[in-house]
Structures are given as C-alpha cells and as structure tokens.
Image (cartoon, rainbow, N blue to C red):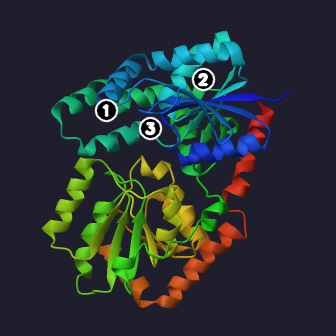
C-alpha cells in the first residue's frame, strides 16, 4: 500500500528548494506527497505542482498578518490555522507521517499525533532559535523589536526545540554539526537523527547557459555571491573587503540576489561610504539563471558570519558552486570550512575578517593554476563521486521506508 506523507511549510510554495528536492525524490520512490503551506495572493487553494498535492491556507498574506500568526503560534507553539487544516486533511487522507519543515510547526503536529496516529518527522533546516537572534540583528522598528523580544525570544524557542527533539519520532538534520548539537544540547538519541544535507542535483548544471549575464563586466575577474541576503550571510564583509582591492581594477564583486529593503539599503550605504566602483548588485534573479551566474564567475564566495546559526547549517550554493567547476572562497563558519577543506574545492578566510577576505581573493586572482585545481576538484566530487543529491536522497527514501 502506498504510504502517504503530509509535509508542513510555514511559507508559500513553490519557493523552497529543499522542499522541492525532497518531495521529488519521495514521489519518484512511490510515496504520495501532500504539502500544506501558506497561500500568496493569486494562488489556488488546492493545486497539483510537479506531483505534489498542494493545499494552501490563508494565514498571512502580508508582513502584518504573518507577524500576528507568529505571535499566536509562539504563545503555545501551536498554529491554530495549520492545526485545523491538518485535522481536516487527515480525516480524509489518513496520513502515515507528517514531515515538518523547520521547527515552528513541529508543536502543531505533535499536538495532533496522539489522536491521529501519524508519525512526526522534524526536518531541522537550521538552528532556528539562533536564526531568530541573527535575523533580528538589523530590525530597527521599535514595535517589531518589542514583538520579537516578547514572543520570538530565542531562549523560549531553545526550550521548545528540546521538547521537539525528544518527542518527535525522528529528526532530520541538515549537517553533521547540527546533529551533534542536538545530541549534546538536548540529549537527543543519536539513532533518532538522520543527516540529509543540502547537496545539489546534477540537473543544476544542465540548466541553459546565458552568456549575457555578465555583459557589463566583460573581461573582468568576477567573484560572485549568489542567493538570499541577510545579516548572517556576510555580504557586508565581502563588500568591506573590496575596499582593499580598489587598485586591482580587474577584480569585481557581483552580488546576485536580494534581501529586505533595510538589508539592501545598509549594503548600498556601505558601498557608498567606501566609494566603491568594484561592487555590482544584480538584484533578484530566477533560479534558472543561477547556474549561469555561478559558472561564468571566476570565484564563488560564501562569506557567512560564524555563529550558532551558520555553524549548524549549510547552504545549497556550496554544492552548486562546486558543481560549476569554479573555486570557492568561504568563511571559516564550521561546516563551510570543514567541507571545503575536505574536498579541497576552495580557500577559507577568517569569518568577519574583510582584510583576510581580500587577501584570499588576491591569491586566487594571482594564481590561475590554483583556481583551476580547486575548481576541478569540486566538480569531480559532485559529478563523479557521491557528493550530490542523487546519492543523498537515498537516506531520505530509506528513512520513510522504515516509517
């Protein structure tokens, strides 16, 4: 009999690449996947998306509504709208497992487990309590800061994370560092945690190549940051580092992606304060163009700050960058440093140290043979060996075969 899995996502879909990869792998393996998520303006309430039976609920179509429901959920760690929707869906579908993407909705699923009989799988994308602390760093609105202090307090969420780890039927950790933290901090059983990392599917490098993406930077040595931008991403460190490379007119930093208006304004001011002409913002780009931006760069950079958030997760762009055959320049955030040194696919600079960032950029610029060696090594392990989603998805499939 075909197993039915309900996934919970406290965000709209499609958008999340980890959700897309996991659902696709499970559907191909014969599981029936339903996804309960938020609805954006104009989206259908029920829709089949690439084999996923998507059910969308109205629980926040703007920042004010989202903040309201965050507060409600944070009071007892149960989201009433999601809870009602789960009960209704389960009454007709009879799910075997509920797979929760990230910590916030775990309590909602646990509150229904006894009466519903399904297994609860907590997929910990990141160290959520510490992520809260990081995300709030650049929040200036006094009302938002008060709301966060009262209801989104990291200490409260850390206590709840322990409960979620001990009570869930199984935990998925995104990286080894996360697994070890849950064991040491919350006494989670080692055999109760499976590491399923953010490796990339080789279909990534089969995307169409758009050679025009860097038309404005022809003949330049391009170092590229791509992806979401926030206070923990360290893009400010990379920009600060470019002030030490002003006399190297060939070296240019491309920032491909976007963040909140406050984050982007802060970065723009940083560029202006140093009178930098070697930093370029390309803004939001569709995922279909990321291969072009990363493969046509000379170096892909991941300058994350090192803290309890970033040291317990790993971005898809690490593996994507390796697949392109270009060297990586990453910060000393624990998982980044460990993986890049393990696979000899790039250089590491001291997290938060803009001068060291610039020195490592200059080393790569001055040593083309080193760039090629590091890039070739990264491409080999992700396309010819087992550092890819084709291999790692087997852990997820085997987990659900057991449950």
Residue 38: in sight, yes or no? yes
What residue is shown with label 1? 63
Asked whether disc 1 touches disc 2, contact meaning CB atoms under 8 Å apart, the reply is: no
Cα separation, mark 1 vs mark 2, equals 31 Å
Q: Earlier in the sequence, mark 1 or mark 2?
A: 1
What residue is shown with label 2? 167
Whole-percent x and y of residue 217? 35, 80
Whole-percent x and y of residue 300? 45, 71
* Image quadrant where one finds the N terminus: top right
The disc at residue 208 is none
* Front-lying residue, 348 or 82: 82
* Image quadrant where one finds the C terminus: top right
Q: Residue at x 46, y 69 (%)?
A: 293
The disc at residue 128 is 3
Residue furthest out toward the top: 115
Q: Neighbour class for label 1 at 10 Å: few (<14), some, many (≥20)? A: few
Cα separation, mark 2 vs mark 3, equals 17 Å
Q: Earlier in the sequence, mark 3 or mark 1?
A: 1
Say what secondary structure mark 3 lies in: helix
* Front-lying residue, 38 or 392: 38
The picture quadrant where one finds residue 98 is top right
Q: Earlier in the sequence, mark 2 or mark 3?
A: 3
Q: Residue at x 60, y 13 (%)?
A: 88
Whole-percent x and y of residue 247? 23, 87
Cα separation, mark 3 vs mark 1, equals 19 Å
């Amino acid at each position: 009999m075909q197993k039915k899995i309900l996934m919970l996502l406290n965000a709209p879909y499609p958008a999340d690449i980890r959700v897309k990869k996991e659902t696709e792998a499970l559907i191909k393996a014969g599981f029936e996947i339903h996804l309960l998520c938020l609805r954006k303006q104009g989206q259908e309430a029920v829709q089949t998306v690439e084999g996923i039976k998507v059910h969308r609920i109205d629980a926040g179509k703007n920042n004010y509504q989202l903040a309201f429901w965050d507060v409600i959920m944070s009071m007892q760690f149960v989201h009433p709208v999601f809870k009602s929707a789960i009960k209704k869906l389960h009454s007709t579908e009879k799910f075997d497992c509920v797979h929760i993407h990230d910590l916030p909705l775990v309590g909602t699923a646990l509150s229904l487990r006894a009466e519903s009989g399904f297994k609860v799988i907590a997929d910990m994308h990141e160290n959520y309590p510490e992520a809260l602390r990081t995300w709030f760093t650049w929040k200036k609105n006094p009302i938002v800061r008060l709301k966060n202090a009262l209801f989104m307090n990291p200490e409260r969420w850390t206590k709840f994370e322990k409960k979620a780890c001990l009570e869930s039927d199984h935990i998925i950790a995104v990286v080894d560092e996360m697994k070890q933290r849950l064991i040491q901090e919350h006494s989670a059983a080692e055999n109760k945690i499976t590491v399923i990392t953010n490796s990339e599917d080789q279909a990534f490098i089969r995307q169409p190549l758009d050679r025009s993406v860097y038309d404005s930077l022809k003949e330049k040595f391009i170092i590229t940051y791509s992806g979401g931008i926030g206070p923990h991403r360290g893009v400010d460190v990379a920009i600060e580092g470019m002030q030490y490379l002003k006399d190297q007119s060939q070296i240019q930093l491309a920032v491909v992606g976007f963040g909140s208006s406050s984050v982007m304004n802060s970065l723009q001011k940083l560029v202006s304060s140093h009178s930098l002409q070697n930093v370029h913002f390309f803004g939001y780009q569709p995922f279909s163009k990321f291969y072009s931006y990363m493969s046509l760069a000379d170096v892909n950079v991941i300058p994350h700050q090192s803290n309890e958030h970033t040291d317990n997760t790993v971005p898809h762009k690490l593996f994507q960058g390796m697949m392109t055959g270009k060297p990586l320049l990453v910060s000393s955030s624990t998982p980044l440093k460990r993986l890049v040194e393990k696979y000899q696919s790039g250089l590491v600079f001291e997290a938060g140290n803009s001068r060291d960032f610039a020195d490592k950029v200059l080393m790569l610029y001055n040593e083309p043979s080193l760039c090629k060696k590091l890039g070739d090594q990264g491409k080999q392990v992700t396309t010819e060996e087992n550092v890819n989603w084709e291999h790692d998805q087997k852990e997820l499939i085997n987990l659900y075969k057991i449950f």
